[in-house]
Image (spheres, rainbow, N blue to C red):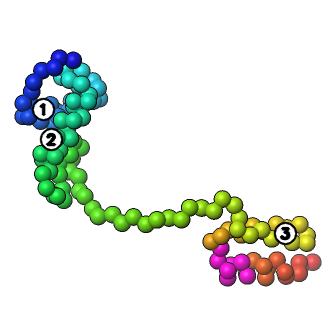
Amino acid sequence: MADRRRTREQWQSIVEGWPKSGLTQAQYCAQQGISVTSFHRWREQVRQDADPGDQETRQGEGGSVRWVPVELHEVPAPVAGPALTLVLANGLRLEVGADFEPRTLRRVLAVLQEPLAA
């Protein structure tokens, strides 16, 4: 691609023209005679120029973008296998995970101990 010097305003015009072009970035860059790498670098520069501070909203290539606060919570990794395996006399196998509810386990065991209705 030709290494031609462009002004900041020209780059801004190129960057802002891409969404309206209907072309992929690669097609648009080829049409403009620029590399995709240069386009990406200038697109980021134009975004920073448009959003110099910590503004809540800015104009992106697809419309308005609103930044919202996000809280991250660590999720414990799942246990690889059951924490406990009960094998009853009749061969019934009950696998219990590490995060089981004791009340639920007591109810399941109570049901298993009930005599079968004839």
Residue type for callout 2: Val
Are the residues at dot 2 and dot 1 in contact (C-beta closer than 8 Å)?
A: yes
Q: Position of residue 104 (x, y in %)?
A: 68, 78
| Crowding at mark 2 (Cα within 10 Å: few <14, some 14-19, many 20+) | some
Q: Position of residue 73 (x, y in %)?
A: 43, 66
User: Is residue 1 shown in magenta?
Assistant: no
Q: Write down the residue under mark 2.
A: 46
Say the numbered circle drawn on residue 88.
Answer: none
Residue, x 20% and y 46% (percent of image)? 60
Residue type for callout 1: Trp
Q: Write down the residue under mark 3.
A: 87
Indicate the quadrant where residue 29 lies.
top left
Earlier-in-chain disc, 2 versus 1: 1
Nearer to me, 89 or 111: 89
Q: What secondary structure is found at the residue carrying circle 3?
A: strand
Earlier-in-chain disc, 3 versus 2: 2
Label 2 and label 1: CA atoms lie apart by: 8 Å
| Crowding at mark 3 (Cα within 10 Å: few <14, some 14-19, many 20+) | few
Q: Name the quarter where the C terminus is drawn.
A: bottom right
Label 3 and label 1: CA atoms lie apart by: 71 Å
Q: Is residue 102 above or below residue 5?
A: below
Q: Write down the residue under mark 1.
A: 11
Q: Name the quarter where the N terminus is drawn.
A: top left
Determine whether, in the image, residue 44 is placed left or right of residue 112: left
Label 3 and label 2: CA atoms lie apart by: 66 Å
Magenta-drawn segment = 100-106
Determine whether, in the image, residue 84 is placed left or right of residue 18: right
Residue type for callout 3: Val
